[in-house]
C-alpha cells in the first residue's frame, strides 16, 4: 500500500512519540509498503523538503512553531498548522499523489483538516492512532475547566475523530470517550497496543558506575517530567529510603517540572538521587542495562487510561516496574496480572516504600522476573503486530 503518515513528532526529536513513529515507519517499510511521513517543521526557508530515512520518505512542510512557547501561541500555531501543511504540500512533488490509506497520530488533536483533505482526494480510508485523550485529561488534572477553552479544544478533537474511519485506542478503558462517535456503524473502534521495536544494548553516555549511585540498586525514570506525571511522590519515596545505602534513584529527561524536581532534591540533600538531561533514544537500552527497576508515574487525578511508552521500554529491557498511577487505569491490571512489578494507586509514600523494598528483594532472588517482562513485551508490543492491524483496517 502507498500510505501517508501524518504526525507532529519524529526524529531527531527525542520524545516517546517520535521514537514510536520511527519504529512504526520502519516496520511499514519492512513489510513492503510505500510510506511517506508528513511533518510540520517551523523555521524552514522553503515550503517543503524531502528526506530519505531508513527506506522511507520524510516530507517536511513549513508550519508555525508549536513547541517551547506559551499556551496561547501554541494553540494558535497548532490551529493553523494543518492548513499551512496542506498549502505547502500542494507546492511539493506529492501534491497529486493518490494514497491507499492515511494514518495520523494524536497528539496533536489539530491534524484533522489535512487528514480529511488527503482522504477525500484519494478516496481512501483513514486510521487515527489516539494516544492522548485531550482535553479530557487536562480537565482531570485541574489545568482547565469546562468553559470556553475546553469547548474549543473538545470541538477540534471531535472534528478530528469524525474524519477517521477507524480509531485505534491504546487501552480498552478509553472506549468510553468514543460512545457517540461509535453510533455511526461504518466506523470502527479498536485497541491498538503501543509498540516498540527491538533495540540492541549499546553505549550510553551515562555510566552509573562512575556516578554517586555506584554500587546501588537503581530505580530509573527516563522520560517527560511534567504536570501529568505527578512525580513529586517519587522524590518523597527517595527521601523515605535515604537510609538505604544500597538503593538509588536516577531521573533522566526533560519537562516543565524537571528543574523544580532537581532543585527540590538538592534542597533536601538527597544523596541517593541523581538527575540527568535527556539522552538519545538509542542510548536507552544501554542505560537500562545498568539499572534494576523502572519507575512509572501518572498523576492520580487522571481518569483516562494510559500505557506510557516508558513502560514498554522497561519491559523490553527486562526491568520490572514500580508504578504510581490513577485508580482504575488499565495499566494497573496489566502489571498485576502479568506479575511484572508493583503498582500503587493510593498515592502514598508508605505504599511505594513497601513495594520498592519488596521489588529489590524479588529482583535479587527471582531470576524469572526480567524474563517475564521481556516475554510480555514480545507478546503485546511488537510493531509488526501494530502495522498488520492498521493495514488490515485500511484495506477493509
Image: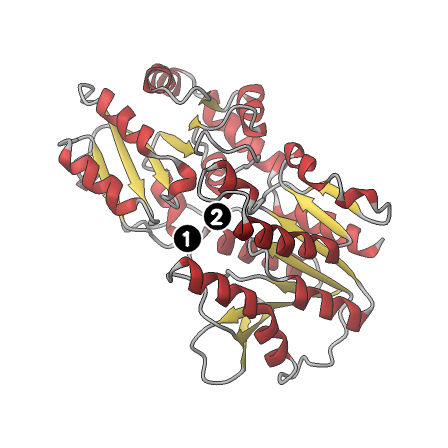
- Taking 188 as reference, is 177 left or right? left
Q: Nearer the viewer, residue 315 or 125?
A: 125
On the question of residue 328 being in view, the answer is yes
Q: Could you say which quadrant of the image residue 179 lies in?
A: top right
Q: Position of residue 163 (x, y in %)?
A: 74, 58
Q: Which residue is mark 2?
A: 199
Asked if the residues shown at circle 2 and circle 1 are in contact, with their CB atoms under 8 angstroms apart, the answer is yes
Q: Position of residue 372 (x, y in %)?
A: 53, 26
Neighbour class for label 2 at 10 Å: few (<14), some, many (≥20)?
some
Local SS, label 1: helix
Q: Residue at x 69, y 56 (%)?
A: 159
Q: Residue at x 20, y 33 (%)?
A: 214
Q: Position of residue 302 (x, y in %)?
A: 50, 33
- Taking 116 as reference, is 89 left or right? left
On the question of residue 34 being in view, the answer is no
Q: Nearer the viewer, residue 42 or 312?
A: 42
Of callouts 2 and 1, the N-terminal one = 2
Q: Could you say which quadrant of the image residue 91 lies in?
A: bottom right
Amino acid at each position: 500500500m502507498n500510505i501517508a503518515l501524518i504526525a507532529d513528532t519524529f526524529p531527531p526529536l527525542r520524545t516517546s512519540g517520535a521514537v514510536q513513529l520511527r519504529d512504526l515507519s520502519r516496520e511499514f517499510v519492512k513489510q513492503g509498503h510505500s510510506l511517506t511521513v508528513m511533518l510540520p517543521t517551523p523555521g524552514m526557508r522553503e515550503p517543503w523538503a524531502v528526506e530519505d530515512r531508513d527506506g522511507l520518505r520524510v516530507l517536511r512542510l513549513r508550519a508555525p512553531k508549536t513547541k517551547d512557547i506559551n499556551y496561547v501561541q501554541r494553540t494558535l500555531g497548532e490551529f493553523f498548522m494543518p492548513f499551512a501543511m496542506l498549502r505547502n504540500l500542494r507546492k511539493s512533488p506529492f501534491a497529486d499523489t493518490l494514497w491507499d490509506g492515511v494514518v495520523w497520530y494524536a497528539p496533536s488533536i489539530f491534524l484533522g483538516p489535512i487528514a480529511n483533505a488527503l482522504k477525500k482526494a484519494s478516496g481512501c480510508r483513514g486510521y487515527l492512532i489516539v494516544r492522548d485523550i485531550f482535553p479530557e485529561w487536562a480537565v482531570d488534572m485541574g489545568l482547565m475547566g469546562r468553559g470556553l477553552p475546553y469547548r474549543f479544544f473538545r470541538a477540534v478533537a471531535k472534528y478530528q475523530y469524525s474524519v477517521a474511519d477507524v480509531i485505534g485506542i491504546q487501552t480498552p478503558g478509553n472506549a468510553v470517550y468514543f460512545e457517540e462517535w461509535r453510533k455511526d456503524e461504518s466506523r470502527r473502534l479498536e485497541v491498538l497496543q503501543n509498540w516498540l521495536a527491538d533495540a540492541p544494548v549499546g553505549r550510553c553516555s551515562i555510566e552509573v558506575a562512575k556516578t554517586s549511585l555506584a554500587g546501588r540498586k537503581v530505580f530509573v525514570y527516563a522520560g517527560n517530567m511534567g504536570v501529568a506525571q505527578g512525580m513529586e511522590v517519587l522524590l518523597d519515596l527517595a527521601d523515605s529510603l535515604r537510609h538505604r545505602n544500597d538503593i538509588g534513584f536516577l531521573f533522566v529527561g526533560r519537562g516543565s517540572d524537571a528543574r523544580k524536581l532537581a532543585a527540590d532534591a538538592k534542597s533536601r540533600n538527597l544523596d541517593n538521587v541523581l538527575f540527568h538531561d535527556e539522552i538519545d533514544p538509542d542510548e536507552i537500552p544501554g542505560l537500562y542495562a545498568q539499572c534494576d527497576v523502572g519507575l512509572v508515574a501518572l498523576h492520580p487525578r487522571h481518569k483516562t487510561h494510559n500505557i506510557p511508552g516508558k513502560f514498554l521500554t522497561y519491559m523490553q529491557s527486562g526491568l520490572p516496574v514500580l508504578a504510581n498511577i490513577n485508580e482504575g487505569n488499565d495499566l494497573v491490571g496489566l502489571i498485576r496480572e502479568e506479575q511484572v512489578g508493583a503498582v500503587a494507586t493510593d498515592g502514598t509514600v508508605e505504599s511505594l516504600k513497601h513495594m520498592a523494598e519488596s521489588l529489590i528483594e524479588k529482583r535479587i532472588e527471582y531470576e524469572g522476573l526480567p524474563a517475564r517482562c521481556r516475554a510480555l513485551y514480545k507478546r503485546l508490543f511488537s510493531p509488526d503486530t501494530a502495522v498488520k492491524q492498521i493495514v488490515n483496517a485500511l484495506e477493509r
